[in-house]
Image (cartoon, rainbow, N blue to C red):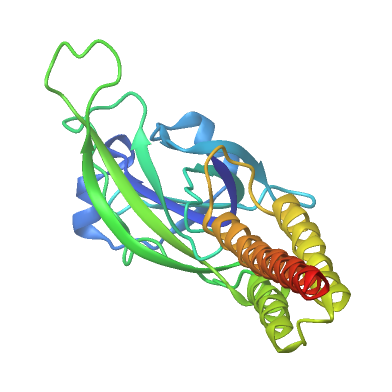
């Protein structure tokens, strides 16, 4: 569960039948009237909220950024405000850092069923005015109108109207490409170049392999500190483990080669000693 912070320009419109005068609507066409936000306390308001909301903060200096308009001809009330909201999003990191997340958020009423209050999107619904983020490529994937079942005491078949939008967050790979993948590839190549070193230079080969192994281990620990803490294995963990494993195989291969060469040299030395003893006996 991660927290996503959004700056919202929220627009909610509804028709208040008690404020609507059908006679004046037929006779005259009246323009919208800008009202004081205090007027909200005297009229009915829809109890709209976001299911995944964690915290709400109004960005303000002297007054709250809020605009209230009313059209006497049709009873339309338009409420506009600016909010900073923190929303919870279920994120899975199996493919981190090449992960893509779909965060779904739902507008709904708390107490009014669909038969009492219908919800619909205004215009295009949701759009990102500034989709730039240093870590993710963001875009609105879908906007839907849904029906939500009752949460408690489902005694009737009544449902709630819901408006759902999905934000697609695709992580940028540039950071890990430069900081993790390319350096680890270079270290693996350096380790494989040890096969070009003459076999008699045992210290040089082992020194290069051990230095590379310790460097990769330190890099792995540094990468672990900057990645999300979860209880399962991520793609970058698998990558780093295999990099260390390749270096270990190189070191193991050279150790086996040195051991076999030593056994062969010991066998040849024993054979020469045996031949010398045979010559002396003759």
**With 189 as the anchor, is 87 left or right in this view?**
left
Q: Nearer the viewer, residue 193 or 241?
A: 193
Vertical order, 144 against 3 (above or below): below
Find residue 251 and report its image quarter: bottom right
**With 78 as the anchor, is 162 left or right in this view?**
left
Q: Residue at x 21, y 30 (%)?
A: 116
Please give the count of numbered marks on the rendered protein. Answer: 0
Q: Residue furthest front?
A: 282
- Location of residue 261 in the rendering, given as x and y in whole percent from the top left corner: 71, 71
Vertical order, 199 against 184 (above or below): below
Find residue 238 and report its image quarter: bottom right
- Location of residue 118 in the rendering, given as x and y in whole percent from the top left corner: 22, 40
Visible residue check, residue 12 = yes
Q: What quarter of the picture does the C terminus occupy?
A: bottom right
Q: Residue furthest left?
A: 157
Q: Residue at x 36, y 54 (%)?
A: 165
Q: Residue at x 52, y 58 (%)?
A: 235
- Location of residue 125 in the rendering, given as x and y in whole percent from the top left corner: 35, 61
Vertical order, 80 against 114 (above or below): below
- Location of residue 249 in the rendering, given as x and y in whole percent from the top left corner: 62, 64
Q: Residue at x 38, y 35 (%)?
A: 46
Vertical order, 40 against 101 (above or below): above
């Amino acid at each position: 569960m991660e927290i996503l912070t959004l700056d919202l320009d929220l627009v909610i419109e509804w028709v208040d039948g008690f404020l609507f005068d059908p006679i004046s609507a037929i006779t005259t066409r009246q323009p919208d009237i800008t009202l004081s936000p205090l007027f909200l306390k005297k009229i009915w308001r829809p109890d709209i909220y976001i299911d995944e909301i964690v915290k709400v903060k109004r960005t303000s200096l002297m007054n709250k950024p809020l605009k209230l308009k009313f059209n006497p001809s049709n009873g339309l009330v338009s409420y506009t405000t600016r909010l900073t909201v923190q929303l919870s999003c279920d994120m899975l990191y199996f493919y981190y850092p090449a992960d893509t997340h779909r965060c779904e958020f739902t507008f709904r009423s708390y107490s009014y069923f669909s038969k009492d209050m219908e919800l619909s999107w205004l215009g295009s619904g949701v759009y990102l005015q500034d989709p730039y983020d240093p870590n993710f490529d963001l875009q609105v994937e879908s906007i839907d109108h849904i029906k939500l079942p009752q949460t408690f005491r489902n005694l009737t078949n009544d449902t709630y109207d819901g408006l759902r939008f999905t934000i697609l967050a695709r992580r940028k790979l540039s950071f890990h490409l430069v900081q993790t993948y390319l350096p680890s590839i270079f270290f693996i190549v350096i380790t494989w170049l040890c096969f070009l070193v003459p076999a008699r230079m045992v210290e040089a080969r082992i020194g290069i392999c051990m230095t590379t192994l310790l460097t990769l281990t330190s890099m792995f620990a540094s990468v672990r500190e900057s990645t999300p803490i979860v209880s399962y294995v991520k793609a970058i963990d698998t990558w780093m483990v295999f990099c260390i494993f390749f270096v270990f195989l190189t070191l193991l291969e050279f150790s086996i080669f040195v051991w076999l060469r030593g056994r062969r040299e010991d066998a040849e030395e024993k054979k020469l000693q045996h031949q010398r003893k045979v010559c002396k006996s003759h």
